[in-house]
Amino acid sequence: MSAHPRTSSGPVRNIIFDFGSVLANLDYDIMFRRFAQKSPLTVPEIRQKIFDNADHNAFERGEISAPRYYEIVRSQIRLQMDYRAFYEAWADIFWPNEAMLDLAERLKKNYRLYLLSNTNEIHYTEFLRIPRLMKTIPRQGLSFRYGVMKPDPEIYRKFLDEFALDAGECVLIDDLDENVRSAREMGMHGIPHRSLPSTCRALAKMGVLIPGD
């Protein structure tokens, strides 16, 4: 296993984006409301049963197939919905953050761009349906393929090794503080994403040039 530096050092050459709540907006309640129409449980009850169960993270790590996870959820929340309807409901929670995709396209002129996302095989089908994303950021690290999720340090090791990157030349833009902290512990730069202006300011402080600014 490759070793990586523990201190962040410039210059930044590689910019790594999270997907949900960074390059795309998301709302799980869209899915939960659809499930509630076919379940005796309420939206809060459905949310708790799905997210408080270890099977959800196992699905995000690729340890459970989509059809098997459907059977698990159907049992958990007594869902009266066929697999196709379940798949569509599970997938249809994203819409592109056009402003952040604009930023990525501008940054691509001077930097290598990557995606590193906790996701599953169903949600990844939605990534493929965003042409701008696939064209702008074709190099992607995905939890369900790596078998590990952020903030586990192992996902960063696998990602850095796959793309032969120097941790000190990378910056991760992620909406979750724990993911940013773990990336920094691996020697990467990290930006907790809150808004487009705040992320642009943080990039500028690191010396990242944003064309058009």
Image (cartoon, helix red, strand yellow):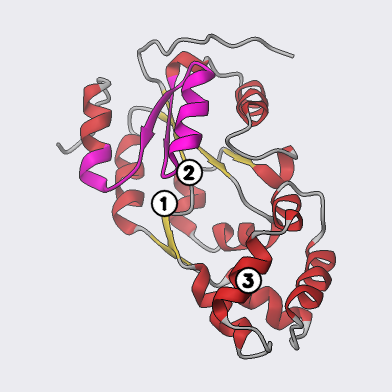
Horizontally, residue 56 falls left or right of residue 197, namely right
Residue under label 1, please give it.
23
Does the magenta run of residues contain 178? yes
Of residues 120 and 47, which is closer to you in this image?
Answer: 47
SS at circle 1? loop
N-terminal-most mark, 2 or 1: 2
Q: Are dots 2 and 1 in contact, CB under 8 Å?
A: yes
Nearer the observer, 57 or 212 = 57
Please provide percent x and percent y for residue 178.
49, 36
What residue span does the magenta drawing correspond to?
170-199
Question: Tag 3's secondary structure?
Answer: helix
Q: Does 64 sit left or right of 106 as displayed?
A: right
> For residue 85, which quarter of the picture?
bottom right
Q: Earlier in the sequence, mark 3 or mark 2?
A: 2
Other residues around mark 2 within 10 Å, as few (<14) / some (14–19) / many (≥20): many
- Residue 90 location, x and y as percent? 63, 71
Pointer 3 with pointer 1, Cβ within 8 A: no
- Which residue matches tag 3? 90
C-alpha gap between disc 3 and disc 1? 18 Å
Q: Which mark is residue 171?
A: none
**Residue at 75% across, 71% down:** 73
Q: Which amino acid type is shown beneath numbered disc 1? A: Leu
Tell me if mark 1 has few (under 14), some (14-19) or many (20+) residues whose alpha carbon lies within 10 angstroms of its own: many
Residue on which disc 2 sits: 18
For residue 191, above or below residue 145: above
Does the magenta segment cover residue 154? no
Which quarter of the figure has residue 154?
A: top right
Q: What is the secondary structure assignment of the residue under circle 2?
A: loop
Count the numbered circles shown. Answer: 3
- Classify residue 173 as left or right of residue 56: left
Q: What is the three-letter code of the residue carrying label 3?
A: Trp
